[in-house]
Image: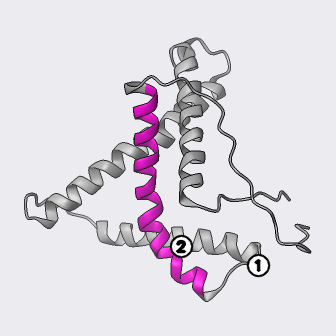
Amino acid sequence: MTHEQEPETWRVWFRQRTRWVRGNNYVARKFFHQIPRFTNKMLAIEILYLLSLYYVFFVALVCSDLLFIASLFGLVSIPLPGPYTTVWALGVVLFVMEILLALSYDEQDSLVSFGLLPLAYFTYCQLWILVVGKALYLDVVKRERQTWVKTPRFRRPAGRDPA
């Protein structure tokens, strides 16, 4: 079991996650051209996974948001056959259940937590657009040098043993 401190403010969270994305950008840039020559194919898959984790997800989110907004204004209509509403609803339910399972394992499940989970589904993913966008801007547009930015820690209330 590990005891970690989550950032207390959105600003700290945003800086931490941007640092994570920039670190993955660095690793991907460093090794991307070497992937075909890797003798360890699992390492090659890991590098490709890093790229897909942030950038395929990023592009999918942006496209999804643009299509949603365009459809709200009646600019597009995409009549696709299939149970897409059911698949989407199942995705939301699986997300909520997965997080609820993790919360219950840590004995932090409550009605309030359960009620906030659908909100997290719609906000957390959208925040990643900003995080990845900022990391791309810093790395590709500004070509800013990467430096280590330590996440600020906060004091635990007296008498609270993490164990």
Q: Tag 2's secondary structure?
A: helix
Residue 153 lies within the magenta run: no
Q: Quadrant of the C terminus?
A: bottom right
Instruction: Report the residue marked by disc 1.
Output: 107
Q: Can you see residue 51?
A: yes
**Residue 33 x, y percent position in the rendering:** 51, 14
Q: Secondary structure at mark 1?
A: loop
Label 1, residues with CA under 10 Å away: few <14, some 14-19, many ≥20: few
Q: Position of residue 72 (x, y in %)?
A: 15, 66
The quarter of the picture where residue 114 lies is bottom right
> Measured from the top left, where is residue 110 in percent x and y?
65, 85
Q: How is the structure coloured here?
A: one colour
Name of the residue lying farthest toward the left? 75
Residue at 15% in and 58% down: 70
Q: Is residue 7 left or right of residue 76?
A: right
The answer to whether 128 is drawn above or below residue 46 in the figure is below
Kindly identify which numbered label has been placed on residue 96.
Answer: 2
User: Which residue is at 47% across, 37% downward?
Assistant: 135
Q: Nearer the viewer, residue 69 or 151?
A: 151
Magenta stretch?
Answer: 112-139
Main secondary-structure element of the magenta-colored stretch: helix
Look at the image and say whether residue 130 sits in the magenta stretch: yes
Q: Amino acid at mark 1?
A: Glu
From this view, report whether residue 110 is shown above or below residue 125. below
Q: Is residue 91 visible?
A: no
